[in-house]
Amino acid sequence: MKMKIALLPGDGIGPEVVAQAVKAVDAVCERKGHKAEYSFGYVGACAIREFGDAFPEQTFKTCMDSDAVLFGAVGDPEFDNNPKAKVRPEQGLLAMRKSLGLYANLRPVETFPSLLHKSPLKKDLVEGADFLCVRELTGGMYFGQKGRSDDGNTAYDTNIYHRFEVERILKLSFEYARQRRGHLTVVDKANVLESSRLWRQIAQELAPLYPDVQTDYMYVDNAAMKLISGPKFFDVLVTENTFGDILTDEASCISGSMGLLASASIGEHTGVFEPIHGSYPQAAGKNIANPVATILSAAMMFEYAFGLVEEGAMIRSAVAASLDEGIVTEDLADGGKAYYTSEVGDWIANYISNN
Ligand code: IPM
Ligand code: MN
């Protein structure tokens, strides 16, 4: 298969980790006779510096012309510490999501046997935890009307949802639940928020169409607790944009390192595959960041963008082998040898080529 892949490494550790994912993709293509054709786009702080725009038109075109986007991270301390900055790197990410219609963000949470001891939670709580967070990505407070009063002392963000937005993300979640263990948890704050009541109403309308899926409803505060007190409860968890942002960071600790978790954002146009850890500026340029989340995002890319499940599995087994063998970056080294980002990338690519 010929695959047009847009590389948007972005800021911070983005370029280093995306480079490792490319090695893995190339190794898979070599073995399976696929042809990956790469193009490059600026996004985030680097795009602001280069073009004065966090998601320039040409990057949008590059994405639209591609079959999949491999994305690193955006963010820069220079902007974080300046609340008055007119353009922000994060706007690039939001513009990308909105313009590509990426309404569904899939963040799978799984545990790796060799890393159970790294989890801040007790081993018996997390062992075998395996669930999919589906976060709505182009609606809610992130994109609702926002503003300030003239005197600057009052500010608001509107948490707005339309029926079509809720319906499409719930339908997708029911489908994923059906393909997994048949259990969907709809997370909301329907005891307080009108937008949540719309979510719950639509979920209750749809549930009878999926009789093979057991559907339950959970308030977001309770879900935050359940994620750490009993994560094995979950199979597919679906929620709105802001709740999903918060809950998926929380859920990412379960595996032991944020550096392990991949994500896929899919919807109307080209899908974007990215690690969930962000730009980690303290580590940028040091060749120490964990590339595994990005490499696993490349596995998701094979699976979701190209329907190539075997190719995804090749990457997953190579990653599992690297963790078992202790070929890990310093976040996972535990006093043992810490490998550089590029060494982990080489090892995984090499494993793919030879197994
Ligand atoms: C994420 C990030 C983004 C978000 C930021 C960088 C805008 O935290 O992908 O979860 O809030 O969605
Ligand atoms: Mn986030």
Image: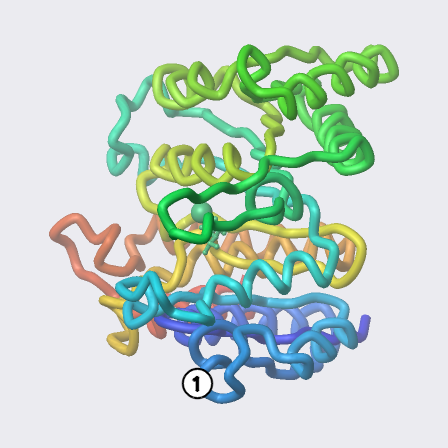
Q: Up-down: is 141 above or below 95?
A: above
Q: Quadrant of residue 55?
A: bottom right
Left or right placement of residue 16 versus residue 209 in this view: left
On the question of residue 215 being in view, the answer is yes
- From this view, report whether residue 97 is shown above or below residue 139: below
- Residue 65 appears left or right of 286: right
Q: Quadrant of the N terminus?
A: bottom right
Q: Residue at x 65, y 36 (%)?
A: 160
- Residue 221 versus residue 334 in the image, above or below: above
Nearer to the camera, 25 or 149: 149
- Identity of the amino acid at label 1? Arg
- Give x and y (percent) for residue 145: 61, 47
The residue indicated by pointer 1 is: 49
What colour scheme governs how the chains and residues are painted in the rendered image of this protein? rainbow
Residue beneath the point at 82% across and 18% down:
206
Q: For numbered disc 1, what is the local secondary structure?
A: helix
Quarter of image, res 298: bottom right
